[in-house]
Image (cartoon, rainbow, N blue to C red):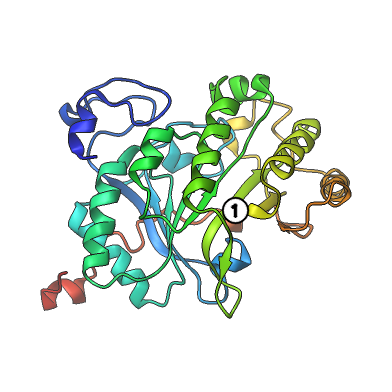
Amino acid sequence: MDITAYAACRLCPRNCGVDRLAGQTGVCGETAEVRLARAALHFWEEPCLSGTAGSGTVFFSGCSLRCIFCQNHDIACSRVGLAVSTERLAEIYLELQAQGALNINLVTADHFIPQVIASLKLAKANGLHLPIVYNCSGYQKVESLRALDGLIDIYLPDFKYLDADPARKYSRAADYTQVAKAALAEMVRQCPEPRFDADGIMTGGVIVRHLLLPGQGSDTRDILAYLHRTYGDRIYMSIMNQYTPLPQVANIPELNCRIDDAAYEAVIDYALDIGIEQAFVQEGGAAEESFIPAFDYAGVLKSAAAADKGENL
C-alpha cells in the first residue's frame, strides 16, 4: 500500500472517496500529509505496556470515527497537529527507543497507513527493535489491517459498542459492531496469543479496551460476554472507568457525568462471574484529566541540538 491510496481514499470504513493527495478531506479531517500532536513517553497505559519506563506514544492528528465524547477530542477533530515527513516519523520512533520506551505506540494512525508502513520499515532497517503497538478505535477495515501484517506486534483496539443505537448516536457509525468484530478477528489472526517478557512487559498479542459510558452498563456486559465467549484467553481485556465528560458533551445530559463507582464495580463483578481472568481494571478515581496528555507537540520536531549536529537516520 502506498500514497496512491489517498487519491480516492477508502482506507477506513467511511469510504469517503476524496482525493487527499489534492488536499481534500473526509471524515478523518486529514489530507495525505501526516500530522502529529505529540510523541513522548506515556505512563498511563496498561501496566504491561507502560511498565515503569513508559510507552513511546505517537499521537496522530485526525480520526475516522470521531466519537462525540472522545477523550482526545482536540486531535481527533484535527484542531492540532504538525506535519512530518515519513523520514521524520521513522526518526521519532528511534528517538523514543533511545529514551528507553518499552514499545512504539501508534495512536489513531489508521488514516495514515501508507506512511506508517513506510516509516516502520525504514526505522526497523535503521535499528528499531521495540514491539509496535497499534492503538485504535476498533473501526478499521480488514483490508487495511492486512497491509500491516508482520509489522505490528500488539494490537490495542477499543470495542465501544454492540448496540447500534449508541454507535449511531455518539459516533455516527451504525455499522460499528460488524466492522469491529471483523477487525478484531483479523487482529487476533495476526497476533494469536499474548506474549510477555521476563519482566511482565507485553511483547505480542491483543488487548481489547472498553471504556464504560454513562448509562451503557447493559451494552458493556454484552460486550464483555461476546469477547470472552469468542476469544477466551487469546486476548486480554482492559475495562476502563476513566471516562471524563469534556466540554463537547455539555449539552448531552446522559454523557455529561462521570461513571458511578458502584456501576463500575458491578461490571467487574459481572466479568468475574462469567469467568474473565485476563483483564486489567482501574481503581476508583481514575476519571481524571491527567489521563489526557497535553497535545503540545512534544517530541514532534527534531531538537535544536540534534539539528545542529546534523543527525539523521
Task: Tell me what residue is drawn at x 50 percent, y 46 percent.
Answer: 189
Residue 82 appears anywhere in the view: no
How far from the left and from the top, in percent, is residue 62? 38, 38
Q: Left of 187 or right of it: where is 181?
A: right
Q: Residue at x 55, y 21 (%)?
A: 175
How many dots with numbers? Answer: 1
Give the residue displayed 57% in from the left and 19% down from the top: 174
Q: Position of residue 195 (x, y in %)?
A: 56, 66
Q: Hey, which quadrant is residue 228 in on the image?
A: top right
Q: The N terminus appears in which quarter of the rendering?
A: top left
Q: Quadrant of the C terminus?
A: bottom left
Residue named by callout 1: 207
Q: Is residue 75 left or right of residue 208?
A: left
Neighbor class of circle 1 (other Cα within 10 Å; few <14, some 14-19, many 20+) is: many
Q: Quadrant of residue 114?
A: top left
Q: Nearer the viewer, residue 295 or 179?
A: 179
Which one is nearer the viewer's eye here, 216 or 176? 176
- Residue located at (22% from left, 67% from top): 125
Residue 270 visible in the displayed image: yes
Work out whether residue 83 or residue 5 is closer to the camera in this orientation and state it: 5
Q: Is residue 199 left or right of residue 278?
A: left
- The answer to whether residue 79 is left or right of residue 24 is right
Q: Nearer the viewer, residue 236 or 109?
A: 236
Q: Tell me where residue 10 appears, x and y as whole percent.
A: 32, 26
Q: Position of residue 129 (x, y in %)?
A: 35, 71
Residue type, mark 1 in image: Ile
